[in-house]
Image (cartoon, grey):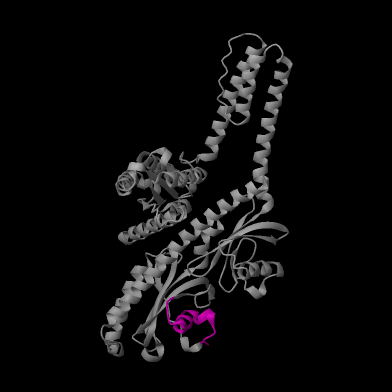
């Protein structure tokens, strides 16, 4: 029983961390692509020689072109709070560049005064990490989380140093507030008191439910420091380990994000075992009581009614094994007949209860669609089936745009109306048994057999219906809502597991979301 609880918990936690890392990595990759596009534009504008930068007029025009592109790109990046481009101040002057910061009140980018790099030492991360660290690395890099005193925000940055041949020209980068990345992490709940946490490559604590953000390794208490050391020393990335934390034994798994940070989940072992034990104990007790009742009655009557009782015994065995659809055809009105009828009706009643609780367990109440548990169950069955029958499937991931804005500005009641409405169109498009609600604003659909490869047709149909619905309801939602979609087909020769397919579909969905944002600008 303990092994069953552990296996179930590990499968659940492993899938959860794979999905969350894939989703977060998609956001980080989007930022990398955006900054890379700005670097490419910066070099393309220089042309065949950097002499144009030495000319004041031409350099001014060059910076204006860069400034226009950077502002346009920044608006398409999910979570970006600032964008900047700085030429080497020792060659081109301290004002050669620009820095834009997102105004939290208006949502607009606001041009800020440039930091005077010469005022700060190379070791001063709080003011000039964004300049010196990429220049010293000599290649694109994610900076470790740090508190930027120039804007008073706890952030991570992706910065690319720009070189023309071997000549250093400057840097281009984007900053993201740490809590923007951590928002989805902080919302995660596992069992009753499980939690997520994030540490950087230097073992500093970026986020933890029970500790302050940004605690450095040297400032941690002994227990926390030992647990983090255990993860790194034993190289336990993507493996399960047992730790002792805050007075409890816990099960922990940790995975690495593409920017070098580590995302982990921890669950008290007692809660893992308690959940499984409770379910199994109830099942065992019910089964024992049922068997004892049937056997007791059978023993009393066995001498005079051997034949009918054998049928009852066989039926009780079926019921004990979970098959409640027993065949008890005994038309006599004597005691055995009454017993047979009662057992038959008992089986029917229990089957109705089991069907009811099964529906509760695997159906999302708001949307009426199968939920995340149903999705995980069906994925396991599908993966087992395609390995046996040499078949494939196609996964579609969908995400409702603007749901968070509607929840925050109008209210969750209106957000629920939106979820319910969109769910209906998803069910109509893919079939209710093939579509799932797997998160707050996230849905999935699985195409099988002859429908594999037809995701584009289904997505086009869904978008048309959502667009009609959006325009009819725009006065309710305050905006024209839409849905981002991404699809991926299982590749037998390339995919090791379902997670590979999910990551591709999720990444394609985020690319679609970025494209939709860009088209609205």
Q: Residue furthest top?
A: 333
Overall secondary structure of the magenta stretch? helix
User: How many marks on residues?
Assistant: 0
Q: Nearer the viewer, residue 502 or 52?
A: 502
Residue at the image position 59 percent from the left and 31 percent from the top = 322
Asked if residue 285 is positioned above or below residue 174 in the image, the reply reads above
Residue drawn at x 41%, y 44% as measured from the top left: 389
Q: Quadrant of residue 351?
A: top right
* Residue 54 higher or lower than 44, as above or below: below
Quadrant including the C terminus: bottom left
Q: Nearer the viewer, residue 173 or 417?
A: 173
Whether residue 165 can be seen here:
yes
Q: Which of the two residues, 7 or 58, is positioned nearer the viewer here? A: 7
Could you say which quadrant of the image residue 502 lies in? bottom left
Where residue 310 sits in the image (x, y, percent)?
Answer: 64, 19
Residue 520 in magenta stretch: no
- Residue 244 percent location from the top left of the image: 70, 61
Q: In the shown orientation, is residue 155 left or right of residue 434?
A: right
Asked if one can make out residue 190 in the rendered structure from this viewpoint, the answer is no
Q: Quadrant of residue 465?
A: top left
Relative to 448, is 484 above or below? below
State which region is magenta: 120-140
Asked if the stretch drawn in magenta spans residue 131, the answer is yes
**x%, y% of residue 98?**
38, 79
- Specify whether 466 is left or right of 140: left
Quarter holding the N terminus is top right
């Amino acid at each position: 029983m303990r092994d069953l609880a552990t296996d179930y918990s590990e499968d659940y936690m492993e899938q959860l961390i794979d999905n969350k890392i894939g989703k977060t990595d998609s956001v980080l990759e989007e930022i990398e692509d955006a900054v890379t596009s700005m670097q490419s534009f910066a070099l393309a504008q220089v042309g065949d020689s950097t002499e144009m930068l030495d000319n004041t007029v031409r350099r001014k025009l060059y910076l204006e072109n860069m400034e226009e592109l950077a502002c346009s790109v920044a608006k398409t990046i999910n979570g970006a709070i600032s964008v900047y481009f700085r030429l080497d101040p020792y060659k081109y002057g301290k004002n050669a560049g620009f820095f834009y910061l997102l105004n939290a009140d208006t949502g607009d980018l606001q041009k800020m005064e440039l930091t005077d790099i010469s005022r700060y030492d190379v070791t001063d991360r709080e003011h000039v990490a964004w300049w010196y660290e990429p220049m010293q690395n000599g290649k694109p890099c994610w900076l470790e989380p740090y508190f930027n005193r120039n804007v008073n925000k706890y952030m991570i940055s992706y910065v690319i140093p720009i070189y023309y041949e071997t000549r250093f020209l400057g840097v281009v980068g984007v900053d993201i507030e740490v809590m923007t990345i951590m928002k989805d992490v902080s919302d995660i709940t596992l069992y009753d008191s499980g939690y997520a946490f994030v540490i950087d490559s230097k073992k500093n604590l970026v986020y933890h439910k029970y500790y302050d953000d940004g605690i450095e390794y040297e400032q941690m208490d002994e227990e926390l420091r030992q647990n983090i050391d255990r993860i790194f020393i034993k190289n336990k990335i993507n493996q399960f380990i047992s730790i002792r934390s805050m007075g409890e034994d816990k099960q922990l798994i940790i995975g690495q994000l593409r920017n070098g940070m580590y995302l982990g989940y921890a669950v008290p072992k007692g809660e893992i075992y308690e959940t499984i034990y409770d379910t199994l104990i109830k099942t065992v007790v019910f089964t024992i009581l049922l068997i004892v009742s049937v056997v007791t009655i059978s023993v009393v009557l066995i001498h005079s009614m051997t034949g009918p009782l054998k049928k009852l015994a066989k039926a009780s065995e079926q019921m004990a094994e979970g098959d409640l659809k027993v065949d008890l055809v005994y038309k006599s009105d004597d005691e055995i007949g009454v017993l047979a009828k009662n057992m038959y009706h008992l089986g029917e009643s229990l089957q109705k209860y089991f069907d009811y609780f099964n529906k509760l367990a695997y159906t999302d109440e708001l949307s009426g669609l199968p939920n995340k548990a149903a999705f995980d169950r069906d994925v396991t069955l599908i993966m087992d089936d395609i390995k046996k029958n040499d078949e494939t499937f196609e996964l579609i991931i969908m995400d409702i745009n603007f749901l968070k804005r509607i929840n925050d500005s109008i209210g969750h009641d209106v957000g629920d109306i939106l979820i319910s409405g969109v769910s209906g169109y998803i069910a109509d498009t893919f079939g209710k048994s093939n579509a799932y609600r797997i998160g707050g604003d996230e849905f999935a659909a699985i195409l099988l057999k002859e429908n594999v490869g037809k995701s584009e047709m289904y997505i086009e149909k869904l978008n048309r219906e959502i667009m009609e619905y959006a325009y009819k309801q725009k006065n309710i939602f305050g905006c024209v809502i839409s849905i981002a979609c991404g699809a991926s087909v299982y590749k037998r020769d390339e995919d090791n597991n379902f997670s590979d397919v999910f990551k591709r579909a999720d990444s394609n969905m985020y690319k679609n979301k970025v494209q939709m944002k860009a088209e609205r600008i």
